[in-house]
Amino acid sequence: MTTAPTPAEIAGMIDHTVLKPDTDEPTVRRVINEAVEHRFASVCINPKWVSLTAEQLAGTGVRTCTVVGFPLGATTTAQKVTEAQEAIAEGADEIDMVVDIADANTLAADAVQGQIAAIAAATHAGGAILKVILETALLSEEAKRLVCQAAEAAGADFVKTSTGFAGGGATVEDIALMHQEVGGRLGIKASGGVRTYQDAVAVINAGATRIGASSSLDIVGVGNPSSDGGY
């Protein structure tokens, strides 16, 4: 963007996120209500909460997002496909999957692309979109580029920086690298550490088209953010 986006414009780019392992139903319901009130892009929750979230968001225009192979990425392709299919059957519109980090760092391009392609096919068959989580804090620069290229070749819809659970989140440098690889063709999601309006503007200017955050209310200037650890 050539001019700074407004808080309302940023709100429409936010996946309002609550992924802590101890998240309870009242917290999920609160996050859903916040997302509807502030017109966030989606609510991103653990798979346990997909059915409830999809039911509550029906007809609101806010999408239901969940995670697959989360947060380690160290499950098999078949397991990730099954997770995605089950989530979509329960109402998920968007799937955020964690890449196999070991395969990425050993530059096993065929394995990385093959896994993403299998999950992309299952996701698209269910009418949902796929975001591929790189976990940038754990990848070499070469591995980051490889995953971006593999995600595009495999038919994914977005690449995403981080789970928020690996000790590092979105950086302007990583967003710029991802934009260099796939910008204008795939969406780019900045997640982890985007907590203020200024943070959001910085990653958007670097190329982000979506933001994963639990501090969404702070970002759009209304305070009292949902607390979710690494997000």
Image (spheres, helix red, strand yellow):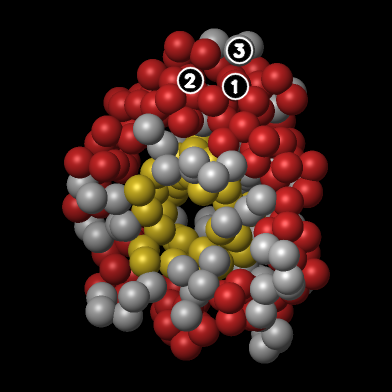
- Mark 3 falls on what kind of element? loop
In the rendering, at what x and y percent does residue 5 appear?
67, 73
* Number of other residues with Cα within 10 Å of mark 1, as a class: few under 14, some 14 to 19, many 20 or more: many
Q: Are dots 2 and 1 in contact, CB under 8 Å?
A: yes
Q: Is residue 29 above or below residue 146?
A: below
Quadrant of the image occupied by residue 123: top left
Q: Nearer the viewer, residue 21 or 72?
A: 72
- Quadrant showing the N terminus: bottom right
Q: Earlier in the sequence, mark 1 or mark 3?
A: 3
Q: Is residue 163 above or below residue 80?
A: below
Inspect the image, locate mark 1, and give the three-letter code of the amino acid beneath it: Leu
Q: Which residue is mark 2?
A: 112
Q: How far apart, in angstroms, are the residues tagged by discs 1 and 3? A: 7 Å
- Mark 2 falls on what kind of element? helix
Image point (70%, 20%), residue name: 142
Image point (54%, 45%), residue name: 184
